[in-house]
Image (spheres, rainbow, N blue to C red):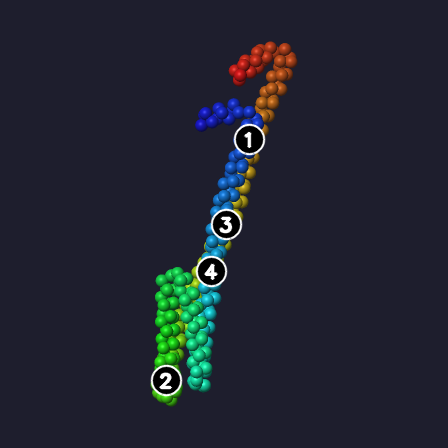
Amino acid sequence: MNRMRKLWEKSTISMKFSVGLWVVIILMFLSAAASTLLLYQSMKGAEEARAAGERAAQITEIGTLFKSKDARIIDYLLEPGDRSVKLYTQEQTKLNQAEKNLKPYMNTPDQKKWFSQIITDDSRLFNLFQSEFVPAVLMNQKKELSRVHQEQNAIQARSIKRINQLRDSVIDEQQRAMDLVRKQVVGAMLFLAVSIVVTLLISCAITWRVSKEMKHSFRYVIGLTERIAGGDLTEHEKAKQIKMNSA
């Protein structure tokens, strides 16, 4: 510590100002780097929120396709034939593709469990329609038709409930990600503001210290000059000695 102080005292005015300048530059660089890192993390959080929003939209699409399939069952009941079966199969193909696209993005154990149950129920609904509902309609088996339709309604209601649970879970993820992004952005702005203030304070402190030393040196030189001009040669000898020691 004493060594640093001696080095500082022996430094020229220009060197002291240079030290102050470099301190400011280094602090500003560190502040900019830290703020950039915080903003990068915020961007990652924003991307996660966007992805969660897309998943919520895909889950809503799956719910819509479930309801659309249910409407095709009513269509077949009112107008039995290959056309209704074909439309139902087309809806099933769309639903299978939507489920395939969404499956890799289930994050939590609950989401994976609900999604697995939805796929199982969807498969059961398709088999019921193809293997039991259609034959019961064609053979006019009203009792069997009533039983199958009741099972279809129960599975449909259960599936829609799980789809809603899944969507709510993903929306909660999105909300948490958005809240985190807001906190990170505010944190980055506060950090940058504090860093700027601290840097300015340090810069002002160094400038004030150097200016104070300059004023002290100027007053000493002016006083020494006045005493020498007044005939005080002892001060002249002291000045020469100081100069020789400095050399």
Q: Helix, strand or loop at disc 1?
A: helix
Q: Quadrant of the N terminus?
A: top left
Q: How much space separates mark 4 and mark 1, taking CA atoms?
A: 49 Å
Tell me the SS state at disc 4.
Answer: helix
Q: Tell me, yes or no, if residue 183 can be seen here.
A: no
Residue designated by label 3:
39
Q: Nearer the viewer, residue 205 or 172?
A: 172
Identify which residue, 179 or 26, lies in the foreground: 26
Q: Is residue 3 left or right of residue 132?
A: right
* Residue 161 place in picture, x, y as percent: 41, 72
**Gap in angstroms between the C-alphas marked 4 and 3:** 18 Å
Mark 4 is surrounded, within 10 Å at the Cα level, by few (under 14), some (14 to 19) or many (20 or more) other residues, namely some
**Relative height, residue 72 to residue 43 (above, below):** below
The answer to whether residue 36 of the structure is visible from this angle is: yes
Secondary structure of residue under mark 3: helix
- Which tag is nearer the camera, tag 3 or tag 2? 2
In the rendered image, which quarter is residue 21 located in?
top right
Query: Which residue has dot 2 on it?
Result: 135
Circle 3 Cα neighbour tier, 10 Å, few/some/many (<14 / 14–19 / ≥20): some
Mark toward the start of the polypeptide (1 vs 2): 1
Looking at the image, which residue is at 54% across and 37% down?
A: 25
Looking at the rendered image, the disc whose residue lies closer to the viewer, 4 or 1, is 4
Find out whether the residues at labels 4 and 1 contact each other: C-beta distance under 8 Å.
no
Give me the residue at 46% from left, 60% from top: 51
Q: Are marks 3 and 1 in contact (CB under 8 Å)?
A: no
In the image, taking residue 223 as reference, residue 19 lies left or right, namely left
Residue type marked 3:
Leu
Give me the C-alpha separation between circle 3 and circle 1.
Answer: 31 Å
100 to 191, vertically: above or below? below
Residue with the mark numbered 1:
18
Which is more N-terminal, label 4 or label 2?
Answer: 4
